[in-house]
Amino acid sequence: MIGGIDTHTDVHQAAVIDTIGRHLGTKGFPTTPAGYWDLLEWLHSHGRVLVVGMEGAGSFGAELGRHLRANQIAVIEVDRPDRRARRASGKSDSIDAYAAATAVLAGRATGTPKSRDGAVEAIRGLRVVVRASAVKSRTQTINQIKSLIITAPAAVREALRSLATPELVRRLAASRPGADLADPGTAVRIALKRLAKRYLHLSEEIADADADLRVLISRTAPGLLALLGVGTETAGQLLVTAGGNPDRLASEASFAHLCAAAHGPASSGRTDRHRLNRGGDRQANRALHTIVLVRMRHDPRTRDYVARRTLEGLKTKDIFRCLKRFVAREVYHHLTSEFSGATDPSPTA
């Protein structure tokens, strides 16, 4: 039989079908360790489990996916049904669970979800959840400081408007704004001091996260960090994008597509050209872009390549496309070798 699961916050709805698509049963289970065991036993009660299709395998179903894989059940990630299909079939948890199983049986769903365990999951938690939110909040804080300075009384504005960000934050954090809250100038100074302290606190939080990430990434993928132009920030993003089981990606071309670095035809009439894929993980594409920029500045081989392709009439954006594609290929081979223990094949351009 084939299982299908529609995941939610409190209850996962499971369904089973046989190999010719007949509906065998559906049931809801709580999202607790005991509920996961009950769901597994219920699946086995219908026969031999070939595979389970799961909607939301990377979010609500992350822990259930870990539980199923730990008990030798293959899990396939299923996309949410499109709106036209939902309008035709209706919408309920049972219908969605059956739809997940049917998508696996029909071959529409074939992707293996990320393992969501091990060092890469730890990197994701520190980088995506902690560091990224702290960077966003720090940027918002400095923008609020500068916006408040613009509308501040002249005595406050003229003393601060020409300062660079580090000196501005340092001076505001050490300032003594006074205690007369009814005075607009004093109130602005108090607000600026508190915002500056918030900025410093967020900077410390980012520095702590960077230190932890540096240790984790160095242990997890030292070969990736050894590549020219790859730092802890870009390496962390590429590891998170690939997941802790990069072998789930069929080829380096699929990794390039995942990173939005796969080329696609964009020809018309007498124009014969390609362009970058606009989909995929945009943060991974940004990491590749950063690596290419570093190599164009510091790597003689990359500079020679850019000069040669420019003489051939290639535009800068097309040269970037080619370089991103090569970097994606190089990163993929390092990732697969790091996690498989194989020898790096050292791909060439």
Image (spheres, rainbow, N blue to C red):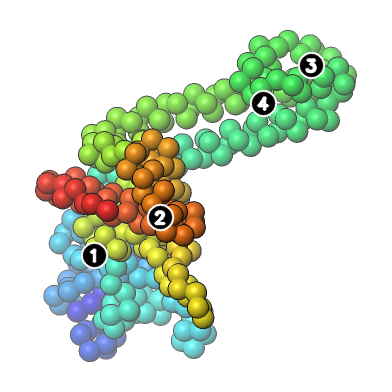
Pointer 2 residue: 309
Closer to viewer: mark 4 or mark 3: 3
- Give, as a three-letter code, the residue at label 2: Arg
Closer to viewer: mark 2 or mark 4: 2
The one of 36 and 144 positioned closer to us in this rendering: 144
Between discs 2 and 4, the one toward the N terminus: 4
Between discs 3 and 1, the one toward the N terminus: 3
- In the displayed structure image, the side of residue 75 where residue 55 appears, left or right: right
Q: CA–CA distance between discs 1 and 4?
A: 48 Å
Closer to viewer: mark 3 or mark 2: 2
Give SS at disc 1. loop
Pointer 3 residue: 159
Give SS at disc 4. helix
- Give, as a three-letter code, the residue at label 3: Ala
Q: CA–CA distance between discs 3 and 2?
A: 51 Å
Tell me which corner region of the image, top left, top right, bottom left or bottom right, holds residue 78.
bottom left
